[in-house]
Each structure stands twice: as C-alpha cells, then as structure tokens.
Image (tube, rainbow, N blue to C red):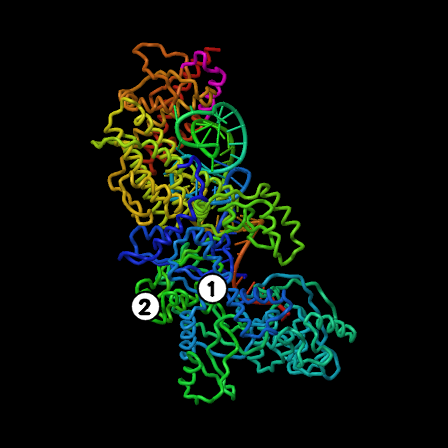
RNA sequence: GGGCGGUUAGCUCAGCGGUAGAGCACUGCUUUCACACGGCAGGGGUCGCAGGUUCAAGCCCUGCACCGCCCACCA
C-alpha cells in the first residue's frame, strides 16, 4: 500500500468493478427496502444538492443491502418540460431561429437529440459519487412505459370527473406563453406606484377616485365597487360612471369586497385581469373584457389607440393621457407584491384561457388522512404542519402547459369542437363510438411536468401493469427530498399513489436541508458561488474554476466580481479530496437544520480522516505479517477494551441510521476510528507485538483483534465511504479470515451482546489517565518527547500497583517513561512535578528537568479550576432542597465529586509547597 | 396576516433536565520504526435578552429582540 491515500487511483476502478459484477441489483429474499430517486433533469448536471441527497440515499441503500434487505434504489431522470424546452430554444435562438420557424415536430425531435446527447452526464456523475442505483432499471419520464402510465392516469381521472377543462383565470407567463401553476409563481416585493384616477359620473356631475397599481388594466374595467357601509358613497349604488379613455359606461356598486380603509375606498373591478376581481365578477355576474394578448400586449378588445402596445408601454401612455385629461389625481410610491414566473422571471399575468385542471380536493382528503394517521411519517416530524397547511387550502391544479416538450394531453377535438379523451386516438374513437373517418385533432398542450413526476413511484415500478416489482416494493420505504418540493412533488405523489394504488407511495419522508455556501447564500450561477461536487472530488485549478464560473452567465456583467471573489476564496484552486471525503462531509452536515452551510474545510478534515484510516490499515497489515504458526490465542485487556468500544460504536451508528441522524452516525464513526482505534489501540498493540518477551498466544490475540476490528470497522464505514473501505477490505479480509468478493456482500456490523466490558473499560481508563497525566507534565513543562522520564509512584494502592504491573510496558512506551518505581516505605518523595490519579501520585522528579516557575504556574492553574468546581459542588450540596429532592444517585455522585476535589486540592497544596521551597 | 425554523468557542455545527462538546482555525513542543493529510500538550464560551417552572435549565414554559424560510395577500 502507498504511504498516502490517493482516491483517484481507486474510485473509478472500484465502481466499474461493482457495476460489472451486478452488485446494485436487489438480491436475496430479505424484507424489501426501496428508495425511488427524485429524478433530476435529464439534461442537467449534478449540483451539490443532488450530491448531498444521493449520498444520503446511497448510505441508506448500502446500509440496508448489507443488513440483508432486498434493496432497490430506483434511478431515473425527468424530462423537465419548461427547463429543457428553454435550453433548446436558446440554442435555436443562438442560431438565429425560433421554435415556431422550425415547427413542432422538428423541434421536439431536436429536444430528443439534445436529451440523447447530454442525458448521460448525470449518470456519469452519479457513478463518480458511488451511487449504487440499479442501472438496469433506469427510467426516463418520457419512456414509452411512463407515457402509458401518464395517459392512463389522465384518462382515468377524466372519466372519474377529476380532470376537467375550463375557461378561467390562470397565471400566464407572457414570455414563455404558457399557463403555469400557482406554485411556479414566485412573488416578491418590488417598488411601484399607486395611481389615483378619477372616474367621472356618466351624467358629467362629479367623479369618484379609484386607486390602482396597474392603471393599464382600466381598459378592462367593468365596474367600480365601494363598501356598503362606507358613508362617503351612501346612495351611489348603481350610478353609472364614464370609464375614461374607452367611451364605455360601467356601474358603481356597493360590495363588501371593497376595503374602506384602502386608498379612497373605491376599487376598480377588472375580472379578466385580477384574481380577486374575477371572483367578485363571477359572484356579481359581471362581464369579462380581456384586453391583453398572449404576449401581454393590448388586445383588440381595447380602444384602437392602445392596441398592440406592450403592457408597460401602455401603462405610460394611459397615465399620460389621463393626466392630460385632468383625471390623474395623484401618484404615490407604493410597495407591492409582483408575481414572476420562476423560470422566465417575467411578470405573470392573470389571463383568461381554456386549461385542463385536476379537481384536487377529493384527492387531497385521503392524502391528508394518510399523514394524520401515521401511514406516512415526516422526518423531522414538524414538516407535516407545512404539508397540512397547503393540503387543507389546496386549489385546483392547472395541468396544461402551452409547450411542445412533454406528455401531450390525450384529448382530441372533433370538427364541432367536442372533446374526446382516450388512451390514444383509437381508444378515444372506440370509447366515444366515433366513426373512423371523423377528423380529430389532438389537443396541442402538454402536461405539467409534475403530473408525470407525481406518478413516479408507481410508474417506475411498472404501473399500470401489475408487475412483481410493484407488488414487492410498493409502498416504497422512504422518500429522501428537500422541503422545497413538498408541494410540487411529495404531496402530489401521495395523492396519486393513494388514488391509483390505494396505498401510500412511501412510509417515511426524510426532509433534508438545503446546501448553501459557506456564507449561507444559496448557490447559484449568477452569484458565482456554485461548487461542482466533482471539482471537490477531483480538484480543479484556479483558472479553470474561474472560467467555469464566469462563462455562460445570463448577466455577463457580473463576471468580474465573480472572478474576484473566486480568486480570493480559492487562491490555489480546489485540491482533490476524493468522493469518500465529500460523502463523509455530506453525512456530517445532515443535521436537522434546514440550512446547511458547506465548508471546504470540513472536506479537508475528512480527507485527512481517509488518510488516517488508510495508514491505520497499513499498520495493521504490516503488523500482522509474516503469519504466526497456528496456535491458541489470548485476548489482552487492550483487545477486550477495543472490542467493547467497537460494540458501543456500532450501536451508536445503527441508532444514527435508524433516526436519519447521519451526522451522529458519522461522528461516532470518526471518534471511534481516530480517538480509540488509532490513538490508543494501535499504540497499545505495539508493545505486545514488538516486545520479544510477549507470548505467542497474546500476539495472536492482538493480531486477531487488529484485523477483526479493522475488518468490522470497514463494514461499519462502508455506507458513507464506499470506495476506501472496499479497497482496504480487499486486502484485510483474507487475512482476517473473511471470504467474499466484495465488502458490499458482507453483513453490516451488529452489536456483540457480551462485548461490553465495564470492568475492562474502567481499568483502561486508569491506564489512559496515567499516560495522560505524565504527558501533561511533559507538555506543560516543555520537556522534549525524546527525554525519557524516571517517574516515582507515591501512595499507590495495591490495585494501582497491580494495574501498573499489568500495563507497565504500554505505559512506559506511551508516556515516555524510562522507569516508574514506587517509593520505598518511609522514603521521602523527591522534588517533583506530580500527576494525580485518585490517591496515586505520579511523580516526575525535577532534578535538572523542571522549571520551577512553570510547574508552579501549572499547579496554580489546576487549583483555580478545582476550586471553582469545588465551590459549585459545595453550594449544591449545601442546599437542603437538593439533598432532599434530587435522586439519591445524583446526590451521591455529587458527594463523591466533592470528596475527590477536596483530596486533589489538598495534594495540590502540598505539592505547591514542596515545589515552592525549591525557589 | 398565518405557519415554521434559527440565535452555543474566531468559523461551521452537535448537545440526552444533573461536571458545556466536536471539526476547522489558533498557541507551544515534535520530522524516530502506520500516518506531518501526522503525534503530544494547550488557550478560547456569563449557551440572544428578560421572566417563570424545578433541588437543578443551552435543554421545559411565557414574553421580547434579531436573522431566515414558507404560505396567503388590499386594489
């Protein structure tokens, strides 16, 4: 083995081997365990969020696979309608063409080509991360099987009256020229104005004033409302107003919709361009006047003077015209919420169109119950509040999109405009008894991408067919996802899963936090703070990193600032850390927090951890060859101690996995590996193995324990660090007497029932404290490690002496002692620095070694600390209420502490006096 | 307006009602036989603020402050 661990040499090779050997497919007949992957955009690339999520899913998958479960991690990708179409459209635009010039068929074909071209990227990246998905079951949301599922779902919902077509207001993205759902609208506060406009009475006598943030929509006004209780307008109900600029007359009406406290108390009603007005309009039987076109220009419904103007241009004109006519009373600055399309960034218009909707309330109700009664459990639990909140106020889901890339809606129109829904055109004819020669035209629209995503758990497993996979793995075990798509995806899967399968799609939903940069900022291309997980794995030079961050920006003017900050943050680029280190970092970040700050320093630390493990393995392999002749083996206290510690660690790690606390699991692994196995046990093993006078049985025990502990530790670490553990395991397992082609096929470590040995742990604590005591003296008094110390033992109890005798070799080596002899009875203690271990005092004679003042300072520091503790303990025990009310064991413990403090203080005082006399 | 988080060492974060922890960073010593991506030792926190419950409160309750997210929004 090389002296330094280099991940690059092993990771890709190991993954290829696993894949070739078919290690990722479910096997065995254990209980099923299944995760379906949240399908990433097929043409996208893997970002930190994916890498994080994949790490968690892979850890769970490997854990369950090793635990003997029949484990399926179902992979796949999403066609991501709008996002993908936009990318290809941009490519076209760069060639100077539009999709309309190319035509639908050719355009869709081109998207497919782009999908084939770039679709492999995500899969390649997942392989580099070690994702053990069953590639043989890879699915894409527009695969033929998926299309069937989508069509059947649509047809069935339609036949059940749960899908309908209707003309109403939708959120319209005038740049993409499609409807979008409520969830795809991002509202944000922006600066605007509030225009106060006079609407004269039709009889020419007087006016009312309305306040609006959108003066251009006045062209579509059909009424003005005031509150019925508003004294200012008493008796004016039903009066006619002359709508400025249009020549139309509209009524003034009393309606409780109007808020008397806002503006003038009069509100203009524009049912075709405002959701609230629309409702009032429906209630009051008002007409709809649609004054906007699909690209948000003024339509032919409006006066000729404004037709064809862009909405914002029209606003300026209208305001100017009103002002010219003396109808603009005032303009005030106003903060208002502007709805924008989450993809295009364009201001979304409420717009009147025909769209397809899912009647959602009947689907939501059972989905709410499934979480209420615990058939689905959120982790962390309180996300159910968010889920309930949305589900209980849910609105019908607009599922049609005026795009070309996606699942085309399975509806056909006859010459008379009648709609026929069916599972394909032929089925539509059959269902509706249409003659073969009746010309039918399919609906132009495609379905919201989330419609097919909502079917993902059932469709990937084979639905609508009754496949063995569906029978085995549905409901799936756990969904791993971010809170940002609880509504988009989680809730809809629950609704569809329950509706089409009669069972929940997953039993648990693990909601993880969002990966942000080290400053807590969301990672985004335009902020220039994106990290590519594979750059952390493989490393990247500064120039390449700068280039990567500054090319392809939507706003190229940001490039210089991004370059500057990148050069500042990564003056040397990013070093290669390897996949295992990155994965371990992700695991340790997986706390219950919802914002996770990613810090490269952590990855470095865990890269070092990998190196530590690697070198520990080197030591174990070196220390266990050449092989000893067969014979009996005896376990030393050290062997039993590390076995006991390992067992406790296994329990902690398993608990971590069970609770989805990957951070705690990772921490338990880290601490055991470094602080117990490496720092202590490997050192303990050295005297045993190297001393010429240890016996062979003891040596065999140590070797067996070294190999056995390391082998189990590798299995324990494998779900988080698959590559390095496999690489080392391949070398260690044979020598540990374990057979098998891969660590992936080995059982996950279980707690050993009688491995816990409190007695041994106590004895080893004494040994460690002895060593630490001497080391502290050495460290604080600046004695070089190369200087061997001759220690004396004072006030040693028989147990102390017995323990010392048993562990002398280890203690001498690890504390750097040349000798440690008890004082003879009556012998005066030498001038010395002392470490206290209960009653025992370990004396390090000062002759020629020790700086008196330094030792006095050291003693003073310890005394100050002790006095503080002592005061607290005394105060506690001095309170009668504590002694009376606290549990006896707590009181006893406190008393023992107090006694110990007193003893140690007395000894310190004595020691202080002795040292001070040397001055 | 409604809902949900967060506030613990310089930074990033754990923390079970009973002696405040880790990683990174920092200081000193150390390149000898697993590892300098290492070893040994050390410094550093009145746990956002104010009340309350309790023998005992980062931990439970109430209020407040600040930061953040989600949902719904008055034209």
The answer for which chain carries disc 1 is A
Determine which quarter of the picture holds residue A189.
bottom right
The answer for which chain carries disc 2 is A
Residue A208 image point, x, y percent: 70, 76
> In the image, is A845 to the left or to the right of A289?
left
Q: Which residue is drawn at 43% across and 11% down?
A: A847
Report the magenta stretch's main SS. Answer: helix
Determine which quarter of the picture holds residue A32.
bottom left
Indicate whether A793 appears above or below A95.
above
- Compare residues A254 and A569 and report the one nearer the observer: A569
Q: Residue at x 38, y 45 (%)?
A: A665
Q: Residues within 10 Å of mark 1 (few under 14, many from 20)?
A: many
- Compare residues B19 and A337 and report the one nearer the observer: A337
Residue A706 image point, x, y percent: 31, 35
Queried whether the magenta region covers residue A859, the answer comes back as yes
Queried whether the magenta region covers residue A729, the answer comes back as no
Residues at marks 2 and 1 on the same chain: yes
Q: Going from the N terminus, do you reach mark 2 or mark 1 first?
A: 1
Indicate whether A339 appears above or below A27.
below
Q: Mark 1 points at which residue?
A: A78
Residue A424 image point, x, y percent: 43, 79
Q: Give the range drawn in magenta.
A: A845-864
Q: Mark 2 points at which residue?
A: A467
């Amino acid at each position: 083995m090389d002296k330094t661990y280099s991940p690059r040499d092993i990771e890709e090779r190991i993954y290829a081997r696993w894949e070739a050997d078919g290690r990722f497919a479910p096997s065995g007949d254990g209980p099923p365990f299944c995760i379906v992957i949240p399908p990433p955009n097929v043409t996208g690339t893997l970002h930190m969020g994916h890498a994080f999520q994949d790490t968690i899913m892979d850890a769970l998958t490997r854990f369950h696979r090793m635990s003997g479960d029949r484990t399926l991690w179902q992979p796949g990708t999403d066609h991501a309608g709008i996002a993908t179409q936009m990318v290809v459209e941009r490519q076209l635009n760069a060639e100077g063409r539009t999709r309309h010039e190319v035509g639908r068929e050719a355009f869709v074909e081109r998207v497919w080509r782009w999908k084939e071209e770039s679709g492999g990227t995500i899969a390649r990246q997942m392989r580099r991360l070690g994702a053990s998905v069953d590639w043989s079951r890879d699915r894409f949301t527009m695969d033929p099987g998926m299309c069937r599922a989508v069509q059947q779902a649509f047809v069935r919902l339609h036949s059940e009256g749960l899908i309908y077509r209707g003309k109403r207001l939708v959120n319209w993205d005038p740049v993409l020229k499609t409807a979008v759902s409520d969830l795809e609208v991002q509202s944000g506060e922006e600066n605007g104005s509030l225009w106060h406009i006079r609407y004269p009475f039709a009889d020419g006598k007087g006016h009312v004033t309305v306040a609006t943030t959108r003066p251009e929509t006045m062209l579509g006004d059909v009424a003005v409302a005031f509150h019925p209780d508003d004294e200012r307008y008493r008796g004016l109900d039903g009066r006619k107003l002359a709508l400025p600029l249009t020549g139309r007359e509209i009524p003034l009406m009393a309606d409780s919709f109007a808020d008397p406290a806002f503006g003038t108390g009069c509100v203009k009603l524009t049912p075709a361009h405002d959701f609230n007005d629309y409702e009032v309009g429906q209630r009051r039987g008002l007409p709809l006047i649609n004054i906007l076109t699909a690209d948000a220009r003024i339509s032919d419904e409006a006066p000729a003077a404004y037709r064809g103007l862009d909405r914002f241009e029209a606003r300026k004109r209208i305001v100017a015209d009103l002002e010219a006519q003396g109808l603009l009373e005032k303009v005030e600055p106003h903060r208002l919420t502007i709805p924008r399309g989450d993809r295009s960034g364009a201001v979304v218009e409420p717009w009147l169109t025909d769209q397809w909707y899912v009647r959602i309330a009947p689907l939501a109700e059972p989905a709410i119950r499934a979480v209420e009664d615990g058939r689905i459990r959120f982790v962390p639990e309180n996300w159910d509040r968010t889920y309930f909140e949305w589900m209980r106020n849910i609105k019908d889901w607009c599922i049609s999109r005026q795009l070309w890339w996606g699942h085309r809606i399975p509806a056909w129109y006859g010459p008379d405009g009648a709609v026929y829904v069916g599972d394909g055109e032929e089925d539509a004819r059959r269902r509706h008894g249409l003659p073969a020669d009746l010309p039918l035209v399919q609906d132009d629209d495609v379905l919201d991408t989330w419609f097919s995503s909502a079917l993902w758990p059932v469709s990937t497993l084979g639905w609508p067919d009754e496949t063995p996979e569906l029978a085995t793995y549905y409901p799936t075990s756990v969904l791993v996802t971010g809170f940002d798509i609880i509504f988009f995806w989680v809730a809809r899967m629950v609704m569809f899963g329950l509706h089409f399968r009669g069972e929940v799609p997953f039993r648990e939903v693990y909601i993880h936090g969002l990966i942000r940069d080290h400053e807590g900022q969301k990672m985004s291309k335009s902020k220039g703070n994106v990290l590519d997980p594979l750059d952390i794995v493989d490393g990247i030079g500064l120039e390449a990193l700068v280039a990567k961050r500054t090319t392809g920006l939507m706003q190229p003017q940001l490039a210089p600032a991004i370059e500057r900050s990148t050069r500042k943050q990564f003056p040397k680029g990013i070093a290669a850390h390897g996949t295992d280190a990155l994965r371990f970092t992700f695991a340790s970040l997986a706390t219950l927090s919802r914002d996770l700050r990613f810090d490269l320093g952590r990855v470095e630390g865990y890269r070092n951890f990998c190196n530590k493990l690697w070198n520990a393995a080197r030591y174990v392999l070196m220390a266990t060859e050449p092989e000893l002749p067969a014979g009996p083996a005896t376990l030393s206290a050290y062997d039993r101690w590390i076995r006991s510690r390992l067992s406790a660690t296994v329990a902690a790690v398993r608990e971590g996995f069970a609770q989805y606390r990957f951070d705690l699991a990772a921490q338990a692994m880290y601490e055991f590996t470094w602080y117990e196995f490496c720092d202590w046990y490997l050192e303990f093993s050295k005297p045993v193995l190297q001393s010429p006078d240890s016996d062979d049985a003891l040596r065999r025990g140590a070797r067996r324990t070294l190999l056995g502990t390391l082998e189990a530790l590798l299995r324990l670490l494998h779900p988080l660090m698959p590559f390095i553990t496999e690489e080392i395991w391949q070398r260690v397992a044979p020598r540990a007497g374990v057979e098998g082609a891969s660590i992936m096929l080995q059982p996950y470590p279980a707690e050993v029932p009688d491995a816990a040995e409190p007695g041994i742990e106590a004895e080893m604590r004494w040994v460690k404290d002895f060593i630490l005591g001497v080391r502290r003296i050495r460290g604080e008094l600046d004695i070089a490690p190369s200087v061997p110390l001759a220690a004396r033992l004072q006030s040693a109890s028989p147990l102390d002496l017995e323990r010392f005798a048993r562990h002398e070799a280890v203690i001498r080596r690890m504390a750097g002692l040349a000798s440690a002899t008890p004082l003879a009875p009556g012998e005066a203690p030498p001038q010395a620095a002392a470490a206290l271990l209960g009653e025992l005092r370990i004396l390090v004679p000062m002759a020629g070694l020790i700086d008196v003042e330094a030792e006095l300072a050291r003693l003073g520091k310890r005394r100050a600390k002790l006095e503080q503790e002592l005061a607290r303990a005394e105060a506690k025990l001095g309170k009668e209420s504590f002694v009376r009310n606290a549990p006896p064991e707590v009181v006893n413990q406190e008393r023992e502490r107090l006694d110990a403090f007193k003893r140690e203080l007395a000894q310190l005082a004595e020691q202080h006096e002795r040292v001070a006399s040397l001055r």
